[in-house]
Image (cartoon, helix red, strand yellow):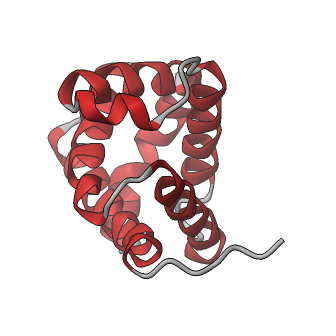
Amino acid sequence: MPNDDMRLIQPSIARIFVVRRSIGQAFYERLFERQPTFRTMFPTDLRTQARTFDDMIALIVKKTGDPEAVTPVLLAIGRRYLTYGLRPQDLRVIGEVLMEVLCAQTPGGLSPDEAAAWERSFSRAAEVVKLTLADPVPVEG
């Protein structure tokens, strides 16, 4: 992540981390409002899914400045999305919903500069996730 984006994102990290337990539920509610067809791709009971999402947000937020630590997480997200039937083009709406939820759920909101830096960060993250969706590699184990 470029230093300018890191400098812009840094102040919001602690605010996001505090509310991470509410982001997952809000994300899925908003995602299914925007894209009802996605609902059938996920389990009926979303509590575990939302907690996993919250944990992923927490991990990504903690490791924001360490791309080597975040890349395996993003690739795992891509493999998981692949099992749900999501396609590379679906990442656009997912990113939009995530930004809407972060702006709404983050205490004090995100400034326009913070939001723009997060959007650039998510865009870069989506490119890593797309690698898995576009060219799936069998998961060992």
Name the outermost residue toward the right. Answer: 141
Q: Quadrant of residue 79?
A: bottom right
Q: Left of 86 or right of it: where is 59? A: right
Compared with 31, 128 (above or below) is below
Which one is in front, 28 or 85? 85
Q: Quadrant of residue 125?
A: bottom left
Q: Left of 34 or right of it: where is 27? A: right
Which one is in front, 25 or 89? 89
Instruction: Please state the horizontal and vertical placement of residue 10, each as a whole percent of the image.
Output: 45, 50
Quarter of the image containing the N terminus? Answer: bottom left
Which one is in front, 135 or 14? 135
Quarter of the image containing the C terminus? Answer: bottom right
* Residue 20 in view in this figure: yes
Q: Quadrant of residue 86?
A: bottom left
- Report the residue at 54% width, 35% height from top: 14
- Report the residue at 30% width, 45% height from top: 94
Compared with 37, 129 (above or below) is below
- Report the residue at 64% width, 36% height from top: 52
Compared with 1, 92 (above or below) is above
- Report the residue at 59% width, 31% height from top: 49
Instruction: Please state the horizontal and vertical placement of residue 96, each as a whole percent of the image.
Output: 21, 42
Instruction: Please state the horizontal and vertical placement of residue 64, each as a whole percent of the image.
Output: 53, 59
Instruction: Please state the horizontal and vertical placement of residue 88, each as a whole percent of the image.
Output: 30, 65
* Residue 109 in view in this figure: no
Compared with 36, 83 (above or below) is below
